[in-house]
Amino acid sequence: MLHPLKSSRSSKLSGTVTVPGDKSISHRSLMLASQAIGTSHICGLLEGDDVIATADALRKLGVNVTRQENGDWVVEGVGVGGLSEAEDVLDMGNAGTGTRLMMGLVATYPYTTIFTGDNSLKSRPMARITKPLEQMGVEFEAREGCRLPLSVKGTSDIMPIEYEQEVASAQVKSAILLAGLNTAGVTTVIEPVPTRDHTELMLKGFGADIEVIENKDGSRRISINGHPDLRAMDIKVPGDPSSAAFLVVAALIIPDSDIVIENICVNPLRTGLYATLKEMGAEIEFTNERVQAGEKVADLRVKYSQLKGITVPASRAPSMIDEYPILAVAASVASGKTTMLGLEELKVKESNRLQAIADGLEVSGVEFDLGADSLTVTGGDVKGGGKVKTHLDHRIAMAFLILGMVAKEPVIVDDGNMINTSFPGFVDLVNGIGGKISDV
Ligand code: S3P
C-alpha cells in the first residue's frame, strides 16, 4: 500500500541529532563478518530494509546473524569458503548494493544461488557484475537485459582476474574483491576513477592481504590475495553522510536554521556534496574529526546560508553519486544556475533518478534544463503544490519532502514507504528539529 506524505513550509530548524548508520558500511560489515573466523559485534548497524535483506540473505546461506537487546548485531563468522547453499531464493527487496555484493560473495561456491527483489531492483542492470565474474568462471542466467530474477552458478574452480572498471562503481569493485577472497591467487581491480573504499578499508581491518596502489593520475590498483584467515572484529558503524545530506540541505535553505549532526562518516570518497555546498556558499563545519574502525568520522555544524549556483564537474560524481536529488533541491533556492555534469549513472539507480528529479522539479514549479547526462537548475522562489512520483526511490521521496519545507505550497510525495530502506525514522527526526512532514 502506498503511503503518501506531505511537507509544508517550515520555520527554522534547530537541535543536535544523529542519523542511522551508513548503508554501505552496514552491508559490508555483515558480509565481511560472515567471512571471518569467530564472532563479530556490530554497533550502530543501519536497521533499514536494505541491510535487513542482506542479514536475511546471509542467514539463508547458513550464517548465524542476530540482533541483541541493546541494538548491537552479532555475526558468527563461518570463515572464507564456509557459506552453505541457500534452500530458497534470496529476496533482496530494494537493495542494489546488497544484491551486487552478495553476487560476488556467492560466486565462488559450487552451487546455484537465485536473487530477486522488488520492481525497482528487477529493473536494474546486472551485467556490470556478471561480466567480470564470468571472466572468473562463474555462470549466470538472467532475464532480458541481465536483470533479476537472476541465478548465479558458482564454481570452486574460480580463476583470479585483473579487471579494469568500465563504470566508476564501488559495487562492481566490491563484488570482485569479495569473489577474490575465496579465490586462490591474486585478484586485481583497476579503478580509473576512485570510488568509495569501504570494502578495502574493512578488509584491511579484518586482516585480509590487500594492497592499494594509488597512481599519480588518481587511478587505483587494488589487489587481494585469496583464502586469508579473517579475524572477527568489533565494528562501530558511523552515521550515513548520504542520509545526513537531507538534513544538511534542509538547514542550509530554511532561514535561521542552525543544527549539529553528530558522528557522520566523512570518508573523502563520500563527501563530494559537502565540497559542492561549500563552493555554493554553505556554512558547514566539520568538528571533532576522528578515525573509527578505519573510517574518518566528524560532527557537522550547519547554519542557514545564502547559496549561489555553481557548475559541479563530472569528476565529482563518484563521491556524491547518491546526493544529486538533494543537491537539485539546494539548487532550486540558490541564486542563479547550478549545472550538474556527468549524471549518466543516475539513470540506473533505484529509479531513473535523473528523470525523476526533473519530473519532481517540474511539478514543483522549478525552472530547469535537462540534458542527456546533465541537469541545470535555476534557483528562485519555489512554488510547490505538486505531487511528486517517487518510483520506489527513497532518495527522491526524502529530497522532495525537504523541498516542500521551503515551497509556498505543500509538496506531496506519492509514497514514503521506501524511506525505510535507508533512513528509518526520517519523518520523526525532521519534525523533531522543526520540520513539517505529515500523512496526507
Ligand atoms: C554503493 C555504491 C554506489 C551507490 C550506492 C552504494 C556502495 O553505487 O550509489 O548507493 O555501497 O558500494 P555504484 O557502485 O553503482 O556507483
Image (cartoon, grey):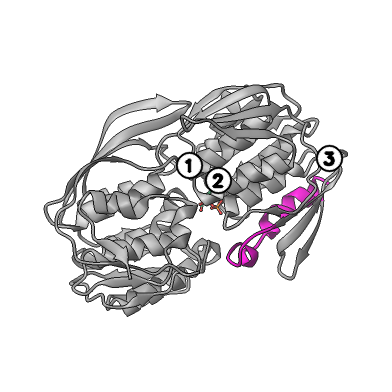
Above or below: residue 221 compared with residue 113 = above
Classify residue 334 as left or right of residue 101: left
Residue 158 is marked as 3
| Nearest the eye: 21 or 168 | 21
Q: Which residues are magenta?
A: 116-138
Residue 437 is marked as none
| Mark 3 touches mark 1? (CB < 8 Å) | no
Number of other residues with Cα within 10 Å of mark 1, as a class: few under 14, some 14 to 19, many 20 or more: many
Name the residue beneath numbered marker 2. 51
Residue 46 is marked as 1
Residue occupying image coordinates x 18% and y 57%: 254
Residue 213 in view: no
Residue occupying image coordinates x 24% and y 62%: 309
Q: Amino acid at mark 1?
A: Leu
Classify residue 122 as left or right of residue 240: right
| Nearest the eye: 167 or 226 | 226
Of the image marks 3 and 2, the number of the one nearer the N terminus: 2
